Amino acid sequence: IPGNEEEGLEEKEIAHPILDKAWEYFEHYTLPRCFADRTDTAPGRKYSRAEPGEDQEKTILYPVWGTPMADMADFGIGVGMYFDMVRFFGIVALIAGFMSTPSILFFINDYSSDEREGIQNALNIGSAICTNTTWVPCPNCTMDVFETWPTKTDNPSRVAKVVGDSDLFFIKKNNCELNGTFSIMNLATILFFALATLVFIFLQRKMRAHLDEGEQTTSDYSIRIKNPPHNAKDPESWKAFFESAFEDVHVTVCTVAIDNEDLIDKLVKRRKLLLELQNRMPPHMSFCAEDLERTVLQCPEPGFFSRVLCCSAGPKDLYDKIQAMDEDIERTADVTFPASSVFITFETEEMQRKVLEEMTYPKICKGVVDSRYKLEGLVLEISEPDEPSSIRWKDLDELKSTRIMQRLITFLMTCGLIVVGAVFIALARNKSITWSAVLIIVFNSLTPMVVRYLTSFESHIDETSYMSSAYVKVTILRWVNTAIVTAIISPFAYTIADGEHLIEGLRILFTAELVQRPLLQLTDIMGNLKRHYFAPRAKDQRRMNLLFSSAPYSIGERYTDV
């Protein structure tokens, strides 16, 4: 695939950049396409996805409105479930909005006797803000009550002291009263949301099973052995073990993952150095990883500003680093690496299910396991794996205790971020409710990037575990910033007060959240900058094509947006 081909494996010419080819790459490789004249026969499905770059049959882009929900599983079961969730809660929110209409009308017409003429923002006219207030004496009140945080940080417009030696205080009383209709409809809406959430959980499980049945993937035929003997690295031995332990079971593929993380890291660094050297070559020159001496002579030296400002290394420096890395790789490759995980793929799903049923048992039953299912006396721990593309191969060797410790540390760091964010939001609240709402929006926008950085220090077996960890952190941070911190820093006496107080802050916050994220996703500012500004200035076709690639996304983060 142009822009994603295996670099450095053979001699190749550095292609001169052509923008039309890059747009063709965007159209046929980046954007998902389906066959125009082929339909899927599975229940609920309509389109059959084409592989990127398909040129044997006619293909079209997936229709925006006409694509069935079941076809979304072509992009992963999680993607299909996400869009099903968006549709479900969109309908639930619409129904809840209709159920709240009587309450809104009550707030507009009957809630306040002053007909809400004094309300500052007309957008809050259907809210619980009370503008019908009177001053009443409070003989038992003292100033300590009003100087306690967070009340002392607000405008003291709801308390007054009689001038003179008297210690009598007056407070502003809300004269607005709620009726039974509001209470009933509010309770009904809450119960409806709770019931809808339970129904959603049930439907999501059903949807997952339906999408999983419609997608034939490698994991449906495979098992993962979590604790193989360190020296059990021969695929033929694993094949013989399972075929002798079970009748009518045939092993098709055996993949042995070994604990060679250091070697992989060094190979990746070497690959990056080769790619950096290739990027230095002018168009129409040939790059060959087997003849780096000739390649170095063809590369121009970086300019003065590149060396000083960007610390760019010269071609000779890159060549020396590659040679040193090759020697290091040769030394590392001589080490004997133990097996960390084994993946067994069977011929049919029935065989996989049979093995899972027979070899999955509680830990307390390990002492009574049939000897046929033991390898060299070891009770094997097996499970159904994720897709090969979602397995994090470098992390398979990490101990469970190490993973737990890493997650504990990142969770404590997340708690620290919550405290720091709460302090800044409280300080902004002292200035203005608008400033605190804006700061919450900024924190919520930056949260996914910060969480991705924190989670990158964790070891996860697969992408599902990684995204679940990131999802929990993002959800906690956003939930605490938006709901908990806002409630804590808002004085109770100003809960339904007009002006820059709780309800006005929530209106600003929710309005911005409703507009900001969909607007950023639809405009795709960085994607358009890459395609329309940076791509025409790319120095070769490969780098131009990469600028037309799609931006990465996380389903876990998208769930938190809802």
Image (spheres, helix red, strand yellow):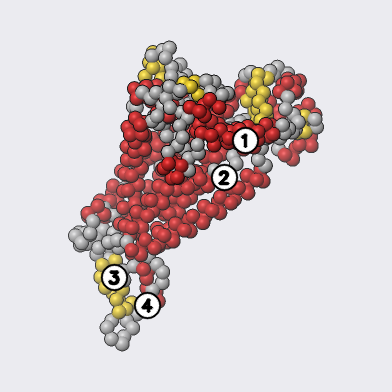
Q: Does residue 516 appear left or right of residue 383 in this picture?
A: left
Say which of marks 4 and 1 sits in front: 1
Q: Return the residue nearer the eye: 272 or 451.
A: 272
- The amino acid sitting under disc 3 is Ser
Instruction: Look at the image and tell me whether residue 511 can be seen.
Output: yes
- Residue 294: x, y in percent? 53, 25
Tell me whether the residue at label 4 lies in contact with that at label 1, contact meaning CB atoms closer than 8 angstroms. no
The disc at residue 324 is: 1
Looking at the rendered structure, which numbered label has been put on residue 457?
A: 2
- Mark 3 vs mark 2, foreground winner is 2
Judged from this view, the residue extending furthest toward the bottom is: 165
Q: Do the residues labelled 3 and 1 touch (CB within 8 Å)?
A: no
Callout 4 secondary element? helix
Other-residue count near label 4 (Cα within 10 Å), few / some / many at <14 / 14–19 / ≥20:
few
Give the labeled residue for mark 4: 143
First in sequence, mark 4 or 1: give its number: 4
- 1 or 2: mark nearer the eye: 1
Q: Distance between the residues labelled 4 and 1?
A: 74 Å
Foreground disc of the pair 3, 1: 1
C-alpha separation, residue under disc 3 versus residue under disc 1: 72 Å
Q: How far apart are marks 3 and 2 (CA)?
A: 50 Å
Marks 1 and 2, Cα distance to the nearest angstrom? 27 Å
Q: Earlier in the sequence, mark 4 or mark 2?
A: 4
Q: Which of the two labelled residues, at mark 3 and mark 2, occupies the earlier sequence position?
A: 3
Question: Which label's residue is closer to the chain start, 3 or 1?
Answer: 3
Q: In which quarter of the image is the C terminus?
A: top left
